[in-house]
Amino acid sequence: MIRANVELRIRRQDTPGSAPYWQVFNAPVRERDNVISVLMQLRQQPVTADGQRVDPVAFEHNCMEEVCGACAMLINGLPRPSCSALIDELDHPIVLEPLPKFPVVRDLIVDRSRMSEHLQRVKAWIRIDGAWEIHERTQRQSQQAWARNYLYSRCMSCGCCMAACPQFGPDKAFVGPAPLAQVRLMNAHPTGRYDSAERLHAIMAEGGLTDCGNAQNCVRVCPKEIPLTTAIGELGRQTTLQMLKDLFGA
Amino acid sequence: MSAGRTVIVVGGGLGGLWATLTIAEAGHRVLLFSLFEVMRSHSVCAQGGINAVLDAKGQHDSVEQHIVDTIKGGSYLANQPPIKSLCEGAPGLIRTFERLGVTFSRTPEGLLDQRLFGGVKKKRTCFAGASTGQQLLYGVDQQVRRLQADGRVEKHEWWEFLSLVKDADGTCRGIVAMDLRSQELQAFRADAVVLATGGLGQIYAPKTTCSTNSTGAAASRVFQQGARFANAEFFQFHPTAMLGEDKTRLMSEAARGEGGRVWVPRDPADHREPGRIPESARFYFLEDWYPAYGNTVPRDIASRAIWKVTREFGLGIGGGDRVYLDLTHLDSAFVSTRLGAILSIYRKFAGVDPLDTPMEIFPAAHYAMGGLWVDFERDERSGGVKQDSPRNHATNIAGLYACGECDYAYHGANRLGANSLLSASYSGRVAGESVAAYLQGLGAGSQDLPAEPFDREVRRQAQINARFAGAHGDQNPYRLHDALGALMTAKVGVVRDNGSLDAAIAELAELEQRFERLDLGERSGWANQSLAHARQVFDMVKLAQVMAASARARDECRGAHYKPAFDLQIPEGKYAGDPEYEAYRARWKAANTRWLKTTTAEYATDGPRIGFEDVDLSLLAPEEPRDYR
Ligand SMILES: Cc1cc2nc3c(=O)[nH]c(=O)nc-3n(C[C@H](O)[C@H](O)[C@H](O)COP(=O)(O)OP(=O)(O)OC[C@H]3O[C@@H](n4cnc5c(N)ncnc54)[C@H](O)[C@@H]3O)c2cc1C
Ligand code: SF4
């Protein structure tokens, strides 16, 4: 049931090249509504606070339960998934902007293909012979090791940590926290470990680990509470060792 | 190997990514299409797990039992050879996932752990915390990214599949797709096309656990181009979804598998906090009605029981559409490690901690057992399907394959929990092998065809876009979607009757008419989401018509399709050997001779043509009715 109206200030942009502009909406809100559900209501009748009928606001969403990573945006200045941003828990008026650091496609939609490119750059995969049967038992792994690895496998490439990172940006080479955490994960896998040197070399190159300025913003904004700075610390030790190995040919 | 061909895979969920991997590894170039980055596909939502018999829990589990459970769980409606191969293939598939780096949960000895799921008595479900689908999808996503880096896969993300292109013989030779940013329409040539576009729960929006992109529009489009659809009336309502106005989020069946209990206050006027209601004043209706399986009865049974307790007995909490799913009696550390992901969903969206307070849930639209009709070739020797046969997962359109939730194989009238991450992955792999076999026998490639059929299809799609964009009526596409969801939830839902179904069919025809008076409400020529949505909703209406017509045609109760007017009730307190039970069994068998058939639908402009075809029952004759008491 409609309970109240809420003021939304939305930064809009029609095309990647065009100038952004602001619009204000008074949107109806129901019990336990979140930013996405309000935007979904609004697109049925997109009328601004001063009565102007405009094109619906473009935004991304899919799972609506904070696991697909699609709907991240800047809400009251903080990068976060919008489906789990409950209206009741936000300061009003609510200010919505596209996720920074990534090129805007339209309104609140950004292009995060750089994240995928960076995952390629650090070879965030296990190199297998082929996805066919090899008739071998699975490798053992302790529950403790599992618990540590599982944390990192929950990264949904939402891009919040990248948006919050002062070192990551359109003109900067830094690979960013999320792909680094994946290197940590892959290097811990029993066979993924075989290629750790290659992954480490990738993050020892330009735009790699040493570009991290240790601002620790990433770990504060990650909606999945992924210990990104712990991963970065571990990788620091791994790269140091790798450097020594490279020097002494161990 | 002959020079690689080009194959199009539409959809990058588990089904599509497995197909992509298999086809690329066979040496062909894959063009992979998806509405968005493939790693955001609906498969990530799956929480509970994936079935495979490992028999490492001291329960004497066996692949045979998995086969029997799946056949019976689906009320015998699924062809049996594919089920056999599916269950036999499951352990190897899990081991492959493991090699891809999937973080499956472990036993204290470091081996794969397994949990209990509905409709079975053995712990058979592998899981990765409560984010299994996410972990499985990322496993294959990473491999596809590796192949992409090698130039063997070309991703077309942010492209929407609109239609097939067929040659003069009716063979599928490519697709037309729309760039969701520039809105450009383009034809792509391919020697085979695999459709892996997922489920269709959005037809019931917002009362669905499915992602907003699970529309079924792509399957509807190929149906309208001549692909057969099968068992459309079989749609699963998951018993335990959160209440919600934008979406009814799933609370995985794992919650019951790990010991969660479903109950209502015995007195609907009992307004005490649930924790203050003593055991004696609680009605654990699943345990009461189904002592053998208790809370882990299959989903269709649990959903109907909840329906009965709320709608017939009026015992819903506060008299409403809600019952408790209770975890508060379980060890909180145990529950947190095993179900962490769903606990945090409930905390976030309901604002209540399920470790302290029972969750409130109700059934919601979840999974399509029905889908595009696909073929298989039976291997007479093994009783399963013949490996590497080009017929497996082929639709009736030559060169078009389907896998994942958008096909109809494996689950019959009801899907067992944790069987569909399995079928989505396995069918993707099989479809991939099948495509590779098909390409071996294929003559001239699509590159040699004249441009004409491709250009013609692009023109046709451009006309449809122009019609949708140019309409000047008063019908908003998002509201049309709401109307569709409300209609389907009310009239083609958990409990059905022919009067409501007739009304649904009439209302769906009227809803289709309303598109003539469309008002897109959006003028932008760049990333116009209303245009894409309106087209999807139109095709969803066309698919909903198939669902309603198929439901109307089937006058019986089977699995998820429940028409009380035709229910054969199991005599209470009677079991095999009792004369009353045997009389019931005889009636059930007689009904099977009429109704144990696959429903098929073919497109016609004045409404779908419904037919029936035999089911392959070569492994297990239907002697035993489903009985979960
Ligand atoms: C909440 C929830 C929980 C679940 N939990 C479990 C579980 O624990 N265990 C289990 O076994 N099953 C579970 N299931 C079922 C299971 O998740 C799905 O059946 C399965 O993931 C479907 O995979 P798929 O590859 O067929 O489709 P999806 O993962 O839905 O992928 C569909 C793909 O098709 C693409 N696509 C669609 N239309 C188009 C188009 N027109 N053009 C281009 N691309 C298109 C999309 O972009 C996407 O990439 C669950 C389902 C839900 C709803
Ligand atoms: S690490 Fe966290 S914030 Fe960064 S992309 Fe992954 S889930 Fe998002």
Image (tube, coloured by chain):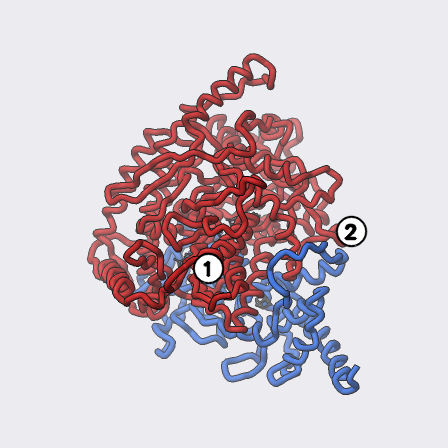
Chain colours: A blue, B red
Which quadrant of the render holds ligand 2? bottom right
The answer to whether any part of residue B396 appears in the image is yes
Q: Choose top left, top right, bottom left or bottom right for residue B115.
A: top right
Tally the numbered discs.
2
Residue named by callout 2: B108
Q: Nearer the viewer, mark 1 or mark 2?
A: 1
Q: Residue drawn at (24%, 45%), measured in percent from left and top?
A: B605
Is B197 situated left or right of B603 in this image?
A: right
Specify few, some or many for label 2: CA neighbours under 10 Å numbering under 14, 14-19, or 20 or more: few
Q: Secondary structure at mark 1?
A: helix
Q: Which mark is residue B440?
A: 1
User: Where residue B424 sits in the image (x, y, percent)?
Assistant: 52, 51
Q: Is residue B382 left or right of residue B5?
A: right
List x then y, in percent, for residue A221. 59, 68
- Tell me the residue at 30%/39% (across/down): B609
Where residue A193 sits, quadrant-wise, is bottom right
Residue pushed farthest left? B472
Label 1 is placed on what type of residue? Gln
**Image quadrant occupied by the C terminus of chain B:** top right
Residue A201: mark: none
Asked whether disc 1 touches disc 2, contact meaning CB atoms under 8 Å apart, the reply is no
Where is residue B557 drawn, in percent x and y? 45, 28
Q: Nearer the viewer, residue B433 or B208?
A: B433
Q: Secondary structure at mark 2?
A: loop
Q: Amino acid at mark 2?
A: Pro
B574 or B68, nearer to the observer:
B68
Same chain for marks 1 and 2?
yes
Query: Does label 1 or label 2 sit earlier along the sequence?
Result: 2
